[in-house]
Image (cartoon, helix red, strand yellow):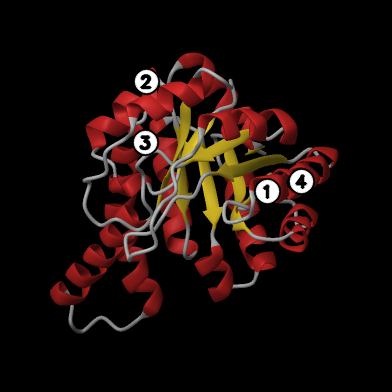
Amino acid sequence: MTRATLVEVLQPALREGYAVAGLVCLGWEDARAYVAAAEAEGAPVILQAGPGARAHMPLPVWAAMFHALADAASVPVVSHLDHGTSVAECSEAIALGFTSVMFDGSRLPLEENIAQTKAIVEMAHAAGVSCEGEIGFVGYADGVASEGTDPEDAARFAAETGIDAMAVSIGNVHLQTDQVAQIDRDRLARIEAVTDVPLVIHGGSGLPHDLRHDLARTSPICKFNIGTELRMSFGGALRETLAARPDMFDRIAILSAVEEPLTAKVREVIRGLR
């Protein structure tokens, strides 16, 4: 059994100078491909159920699927609730056996974000579960602007909540389809100077691959969330499969054919963070 918490995979990454991939899952085939890639690379992996995934499939199904994959894996696998927005949602994930939850209070006033995140951290820790929080706001490529993380707020947030990992906004943006994001190195350095909590980059798909590698090796960024890049790979492989085999109609056969190229893509992602 290789279920792991976020602390168990991020603290070694922080000490040894690498990062762990937080991979956004949308179904069985991609989640299975992600674990296969992690096993091939001998690396831990974080399987993430985000809001879109939870709208598509109930959280208990995600829990059962993640745990089945983790229990059969030879590497540490974290089952992670991504962008939880309420105590109730995080509580349900903890009750279902998720080993990590992220509470996203980034749109709340600072005091309220601290208070709600602290309450969820205490609930999670009492159950042996890790908790990630967010300070500042990571925007979206479709037009919702970011609000950069204030280093003084980050110091307060980390100290007062007791979070295990802190998502920050330093130039990263959700849902970017091109690797064009530029990181505010000065802001990152000022955050690093006031806290020793592992940092998380949401919107990791938008960062150039060499930049991800450099940040993983030289900064306290220990987790990169990767979603859009992998969805694009999945969609491309699916189109190629159907174009090559227009007679194919069986759902299992079609989706299974996508797993091998997706596994290869994820292996590249994992290698780039080490």
Horizontal placement of 112 versus 68: left or right?
right
- Mark 3 or 4, closer to the camera: 4
Mark 3 vs mark 4, CA separation in Å: 34 Å
Against 28, is 2 above or below?
Answer: above
Element marked by disc 1: helix
Residues packed near mark 3 inside 10 Å, few (<14), some (14 to 19) or many (20 plus): many
Mark 2 vs mark 1, CA separation in Å: 30 Å
Mark 1 vs mark 4, CA separation in Å: 6 Å
Name the one closer to the observer, 33 or 188: 188
Sequence-earlier tag: 4 or 2 = 4
Amino acid type assigned to the residue bearing label 3 in the image: Ile
Mark 1 vs mark 3, CA separation in Å: 32 Å
Mark 4 vs mark 2, CA separation in Å: 33 Å
Residue at (41% x, 29% y) in the render: 187
* Pointer 1 residue: 113
Q: Position of residue 109 (x, y in %)?
A: 64, 52
Quadrant of res 50: bottom right
* Pointer 3 residue: 270
Q: Do the residues labelled 3 and 4 touch (CB within 8 Å)?
A: no
Against 104, is 273 above or below?
Answer: above
Q: Position of residue 174 (x, y in %)?
A: 38, 55
* Pointer 2 residue: 217
Which image quadrant: the C terminus? Answer: top left
- Mark 4 or 2, closer to the camera: 4
Q: Do the residues labelled 1 and 4 touch (CB within 8 Å)?
A: yes
Q: Do the residues labelled 2 and 1 touch (CB within 8 Å)?
A: no
* Pointer 4 residue: 115
Against 167, is 229 above or below?
Answer: below
Sequence-earlier tag: 1 or 3 = 1
Horizontal placement of 222 versus 78: left or right?
left
Element marked by disc 3: helix
